[in-house]
């Protein structure tokens, strides 16, 4: 695909330029075999309002950040491994056109391009990089994705109780499991979701019940499996392969 560009001077210079733009706030991006394929500004749907973000597509990662001075300074660097990415086309809205969703196990979000042609180019290049990387790694596409957060302005009331009205004093919160905008009373619980964070995360009351039910079922299934294993009269072996 682009492996022949990996060790070229021009590729090294391009990657160094991106690193310089992020400065000390960014992580090093130059690693053996990595190739910078393209860059562009996309609009990312954020919690409060859509914001322009700079995106860099490499053959193994997608990097994006906030624009301080275009082509000169960026911050808030985010690095997404492409093997963890799947894409979903989205319909236009009154506010945003040429939209699609970037889904990963840790975070999912919506972006939009300035034109339909630009969206096609981004998606085409992304899909090609993902296919090439998965084939190279011998992996299947990711199936577990974090729920995208629904923007704050999408609702004026809690999406669970449908009663609490948000205001300056009544804050909006987001369930980390479903992404709904909820009030404090409907999101008092916390739950451990290791793929998202090492700490317990805020979840809404409905998701908490579902997660607890799943946890209970897993515990019961595990206990049942242990009892069944003991009944065979043979020790259960744990594979080390």
Image (spheres, grey):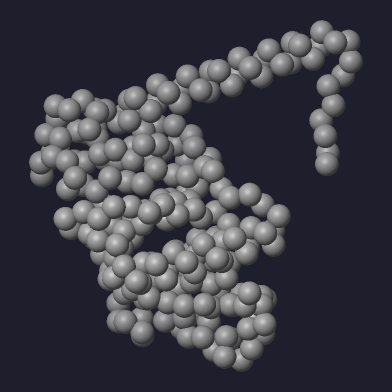
Residue 91's place in the image compared with 184, above or below, is: below
The residue sitting at 50% across, 47% down in the picture is 105
Residue 57's place in the image compared with 232, above or below, is: below
The residue sitting at 56% across, 48% down in the picture is 142
Q: Is residue 152 left or right of residue 239?
A: left
Residue 54 or 92: which is nearer the viewer?
92
Q: In this view, does 161 lie to the left or right of 70?
A: left
- Residue 14 can be seen, yes or no: yes
Q: Where is residue 153 in the image (x, y as percent from the top left)?
A: 17, 48
Q: In this view, does 74 lie to the left or right of 83?
A: left
Residue 97 or 192: which is nearer the viewer?
97
Residue 230's place in the image compared with 21, above or below, is: above
| Quarter occupied by the C terminus | top right
The number of callouts visible is 0
| Quarter occupied by the N terminus | bottom right
The residue sitting at 36% across, 57% down in the picture is 100
- Residue at the far top in the pictured view: 231
- Residue at the far right in the pictured view: 234
Q: Position of residue 158 (x, y in %)?
A: 19, 33
Residue 125's place in the image compared with 142, above or below, is: below
The residue sitting at 31% across, 59% down in the picture is 99
């Amino acid at each position: 695909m682009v492996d022949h560009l990996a060790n070229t001077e021009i590729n090294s210079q391009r990657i160094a330029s991106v690193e310089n733009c992020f400065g000390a706030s960014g992580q090093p991006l130059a690693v053996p075999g990595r190739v910078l394929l393209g860059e562009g500004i996309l609009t990312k749907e954020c919690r409060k309002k859509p914001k322009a973000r700079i995106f860099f597509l490499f053959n193994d990662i997608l990097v994006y950040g906030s624009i301080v001075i275009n082509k000169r300074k960026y911050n808030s660097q985010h690095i997404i491994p492409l093997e963890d990415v799947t894409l979903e086309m989205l319909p236009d809205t009154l506010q945003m056109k040429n939209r699609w969703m970037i889904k990963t196990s840790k975070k999912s979000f919506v972006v939009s391009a300035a034109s339909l042609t630009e969206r096609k180019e981004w998606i085409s290049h992304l899909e090609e990089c993902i296919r090439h990387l998965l084939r190279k790694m011998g992996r299947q596409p990711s199936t577990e994705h974090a729920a995208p957060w629904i923007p704050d302005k999408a609702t004026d009331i809690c999406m669970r109780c449908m009663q609490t009205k948000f205001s300056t004093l009544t804050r909006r919160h987001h369930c980390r499991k479903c992404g709904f905008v909820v009030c404090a009373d409907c999101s008092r619980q916390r739950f451990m979701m290791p793929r998202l964070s090492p700490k317990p995360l805020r979840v809404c009351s409905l998701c908490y019940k579902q997660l607890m039910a799943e946890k209970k079922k897993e515990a019961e299934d595990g206990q049942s499996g242990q009892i069944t294993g003991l009944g065979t009269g043979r020790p259960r072996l744990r594979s080390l392969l």
